[in-house]
Amino acid sequence: MQLYFLTNFGSKLEQNQRFSNSPGEYLFFLIVVTVFVSTLSLLIAWPRGYPLTGPSVIFAIIYYWSRCEPEAPLSIWGFQVKGYQLPFALVFVTLLMGGDIWRDILGLAAGHLYHFLRDVVPVVYRVNLLKTPKFFTSFVDGRLNPPRPTGRPQAPQQNQPRMFGGGGHRLGGN
């Protein structure tokens, strides 16, 4: 289930208008949320923290997606919910199945902290605390989207050796 949530909601969040123009901003989001989850894990379960925080990071992705697309219709085991209700429905399902909800709450807190610092604080207080650094976005975007060469493509040189240039032989043949 965790892998499904990661691929489904991670790709939806990556394609969202907040991250669609720059893969570097999405990577920065993942780094910041991972740091938040690790820090909150240490604060809750001092001194060792929780050993596995991957599900919490995935839950933070789900929570932030639910804040980006609050009115998106979803179906969970036949029940219709809106996007903003999804994290709480997942916590309720985990609670009904007898699971540990602390990791979900940890991810919910980290996702909400990111949402608050990135989306609420700049609007209300006019201070941008989580702005992605320019060097980070330019480095990541340059690596993932290299500049295309301009001009006419050059023909390959004729004197370069070819890989696998032999005639070949069929297996079992003469």
Image: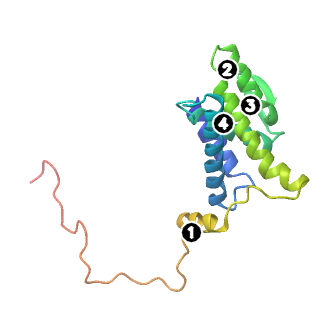
User: Which residue was labeled with disc 2?
Assistant: 94
Q: Residue type at mark 4: give it.
A: Leu
Label 3: element kind: helix
Helix, strand or loop status at disc 1? helix
Above or below, comparing residue 140 to residue 3 in the picture: below
Label 2, secondary structure: give it. helix
- Report how far apart the C-alphas of labels 3 and 2 lie in the structure: 11 Å
| Amino acid under disc 3 | Pro
Q: Which residue is mark 1?
A: 142
Q: Give whichever of discs 4 and 2 has the lower sequence position.
A: 4
First-in-chain label (3 vs 2): 3
Secondary structure beneath dot 4 equals helix
**What residue is at 66 percent from the left and 51 percent from the top?**
29
Q: Position of residue 73 (x, y in %)?
A: 80, 35
Mark pair 4, 3: CA separation: 18 Å
Query: Which of the two residues, 35 or 119, is positioned nearer the viewer here?
Result: 35
Q: Which mark is residue 71?
A: none
Mark 4 or 1, nearer chain start: 4
Give the amino acid type for the residue marked by disc 1 in the picture: Gly
Q: CA distance from mark 1 to mark 2?
A: 41 Å
Residue for point 61% across, 34% down: 42
162 and 108: which is toward the camera: 108
Q: Is residue 129 left or right of residue 160?
A: right
CA–CA distance between discs 3 and 1? 34 Å
Name the image quarter holding residue 22.
bottom right
On the image, numbered disc 3 is attached to which residue? 87
Pointer 4 or 3: first along the chain:
4
Q: Residue furthest front?
A: 47
Q: Which mark is residue 40?
A: 4
| Residue farthest toward the left in the current orientation of the protein | 174
Residue 45 image-quadrant placement: top right
Return the disc, 3 or 1, that comes first in the chain's sequence: 3
